[in-house]
Image: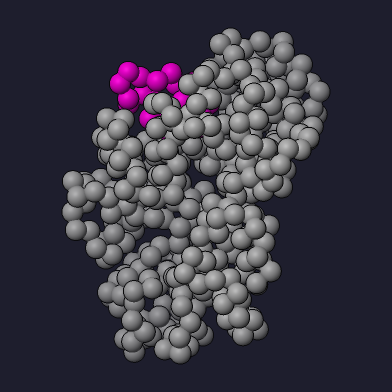
C-alpha cells in the first residue's frame, strides 16, 4: 500500500518558511477507493511519524495536519510528539461539547491548534481561548471580512493565517488586514511582469545558466563568471566543501571544485547555488520549489517512453520558475539562454512531452489530483511511480537547500 501527499509552505510576513501543510491524496479510485478524512489523516501520521521517516521533507519545520472530528474526540494527536505538528481542526467538525472537551485537553497538554477554513460564528466563540491559529480561505472569505474579525481579536494570543494567497497583491492586502501567516503560491508568480533591468546577481545567474545549457561546459568561462562575483564565489566554495566534507583537505579554489565535481555535478551545483544567489528578497520556499521541481521533472523524464534527456527535463523544471526568481516574463528570459526548442515550447506554451511533464509537476505541487491523474495517463506513467518520485525530489531539494545556505 502506498500513500500520496504533497506539501505547501506556510510563510510569515518576511516570507520565511515556518512550516508545511501536508496534503493527502485521496486520488483516483484505482489507488485509494473511498478514503475518508479519518483514514487520510491516519495514513499521513503513520507515514510521517512511524514508518518511513519522511520528516526530512519538512526540513525540521512543523507539519500542519488536518484532523477530522472522530480523530480529535479519540485524542489521536496525543500519540504523536506535540513539537512536530500543528493540529488543524477541519471545517467539517461540529462545535459540540464533546469537541470542546477534546480541544481543551489538547491545549492543556501543550499542542498547537488551528481552526481550518474558519467562518466566524457564535458557536465557535467558546473555542477561541484554546486556539492558537485561525485560518481563513481567501477564496471563500474575502480579505475585508477576515480583517474585521482579526481587528476584533487582535488583542488576544491568536495568530491569523491566510490560505490560497495566489498573487503578490493578495499577499500585500492580507498583510494590511492583519494576517501573520500565509499559504499559497503567490511566491511562485512574478511580483512584477513589466520589463526591468537585471540586478548584478541576476546577471551572474543568467550567465551561469547560459553555460550549463550548452552541450559542453566551458570551465574557463564558468570560472571567469564566478571570479567577478565575490558573494557567489564564497557560496560556491562553502557549498562544495559541504558536499565533500569527507576529504581530508578542503577545496580552496573554484578551479579545484571544477575538477573535483566534473561536468554533470557541476551543472547541478550551479543550478541550486546560482538560484539561491539570485533570490534577494524572494522567499526561501521559491528556491526550494525551483530545485524540487527540477529534480522531479528529471525523474519523471526517465519514466516516459522514449526517455527524455535528464538534463533537458531538469532544466525545464528549474527554469519553470525563472520568471518568478528574476521578475521578468519567461518568454523574454528564455531568449537569453541557449535552450532547445523543446524546452522553450514547454516553458512558454507547456506543449510537447516536456510540457506535459511540467504540467504534471505543477499539478502535484498544487495537490490538483484529478490533473495529476490525467497527465500521468497522457505520459503513460504509473501514478505510484509519480508519487515515489515526488517524495524523492522533496528529500533531494531539502538536502541541497540546507547545504547551499550554510
Compared with 306, 108 (above or below) is below
* Main SS of residues in magenta: helix
Residue situated in front as seen by the camera: 73 or 256: 73
Q: Residue at x 33, y 87 (%)?
A: 96
Compared with 131, 383 (above or below) is above
Q: How many marks?
A: 0
Q: Is residue 269 left or right of residue 110?
A: right
Residue situated in front as seen by the camera: 145 or 384: 145
Q: Is residue 114 left or right of residue 174?
A: left
Compared with 218, 116 (above or below) is below
Q: How is the image coloured?
A: one colour
Q: Residue at x 65, y 30 (%)?
A: 332
Q: Residue at x 41, y 77 (%)?
A: 106
Coordinates of residue 4 in the picture (x, y in percent): 32, 48
Residue 304 in magenta stretch: yes
Can residue 314 be seen from the camera position used here?
Answer: no
Residue 152: quarter of image: bottom right
Give the residues drawn in magenta, as a range.
Answer: 296-317
Can residue 233 be seen from the camera position used here?
Answer: yes
Residue 154: quarter of image: bottom right
Question: Where does the C terminus fall, quadrant-wise?
Answer: top right
Coordinates of residue 215 in the picture (x, y in percent): 56, 11
Coordinates of residue 12 in the picture (x, y in percent): 62, 60
Q: Residue at x 40, y 44 (%)?
A: 364
Coordinates of residue 220 in the picture (x, y in percent): 72, 10
Residue 121 in magenta stretch: no
Amino acid at each position: 500500500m502506498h500513500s500520496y501527499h504533497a506539501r505547501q509552505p506556510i510563510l510569515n510576513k518576511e516570507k520565511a518558511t515556518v512550516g508545511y501543510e501536508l496534503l493527502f491524496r485521496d486520488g483516483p479510485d484505482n489507488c485509494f477507493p473511498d478514503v475518508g478524512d479519518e483514514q487520510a489523516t491516519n495514513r499521513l501520521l503513520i507515514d510521517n511519524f512511524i514508518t518511513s521517516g519522511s520528516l526530512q521533507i519538512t526540513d525540521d519545520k512543523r507539519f500542519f495536519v488536518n484532523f477530522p472530528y472522530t480523530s480529535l474526540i479519540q485524542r489521536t494527536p496525543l500519540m504523536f510528539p506535540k513539537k512536530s505538528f500543528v493540529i488543524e481542526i477541519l471545517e467539517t467538525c461540529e462545535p459540540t461539547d464533546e469537541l470542546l472537551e477534546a480541544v481543551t485537553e489538547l491545549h492543556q497538554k501543550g499542542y498547537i491548534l488551528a481552526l481550518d477554513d474558519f467562518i466566524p460564528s457564535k458557536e465557535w466563540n467558546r473555542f477561541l481561548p484554546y486556539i492558537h491559529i485561525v485560518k481563513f480561505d481567501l477564496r471563500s472569505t474575502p480579505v475585508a471580512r477576515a480583517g474585521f474579525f482579526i481587528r476584533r481579536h487582535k488583542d488576544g494570543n491568536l495568530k491569523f493565517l491566510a490560505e490560497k494567497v495566489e498573487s503578490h497583491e493578495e499577499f500585500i492586502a492580507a498583510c494590511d488586514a492583519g494576517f501573520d501567516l500565509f499559504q499559497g503560491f503567490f511566491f511562485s508568480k512574478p511580483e512584477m511582469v513589466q520589463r526591468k533591468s537585471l540586478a548584478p546577481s541576476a546577471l551572474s545567474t543568467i550567465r551561469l545558466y547560459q553555460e550549463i545549457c550548452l552541450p559542453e561546459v566551458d570551465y574557463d568561462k564558468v570560472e571567469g563568471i564566478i571570479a567577478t562575483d565575490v558573494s557567489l564565489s564564497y557560496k560556491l566554495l562553502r557549498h562544495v566543501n559541504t558536499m565533500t566534507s569527507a576529504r581530508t583537505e578542503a577545496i580552496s579554489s573554484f578551479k579545484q571544485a571544477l575538477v573535483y565535481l566534473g561536468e554533470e555535478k557541476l551543472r547541478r551545483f550551479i543550478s541550486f547555488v546560482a538560484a539561491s544567489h539570485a533570490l534577494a528578497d524572494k522567499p526561501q520556499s521559491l528556491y526550494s520549489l525551483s530545485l524540487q521541481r527540477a529534480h522531479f521533472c528529471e525523474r519523471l523524464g526517465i519514466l516516459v517512453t522514449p526517455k527524455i534527456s535528464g538534463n533537458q527535463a531538469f532544466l525545464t523544471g528549474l527554469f519553470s520558475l525563472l520568471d518568478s526568481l528574476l521578475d521578468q516574463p519567461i518568454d523574454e528570459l528564455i531568449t537569453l539562454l541557449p535552450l532547445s526548442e523543446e524546452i522553450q515550447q514547454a516553458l512558454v506554451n507547456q506543449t510537447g512531452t516536456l510540457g506535459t511533464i511540467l504540467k504534471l509537476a505543477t499539478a502535484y505541487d498544487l495537490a490538483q489530483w484529478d490533473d495529476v491523474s490525467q497527465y500521468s495517463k497522457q505520459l503513460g506513467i504509473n501514478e505510484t511511480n509519480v508519487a515515489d518520485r515526488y517524495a524523492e525530489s522533496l528529500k533531494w531539494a531539502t538536502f541541497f537547500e540546507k547545504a547551499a545556505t550554510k
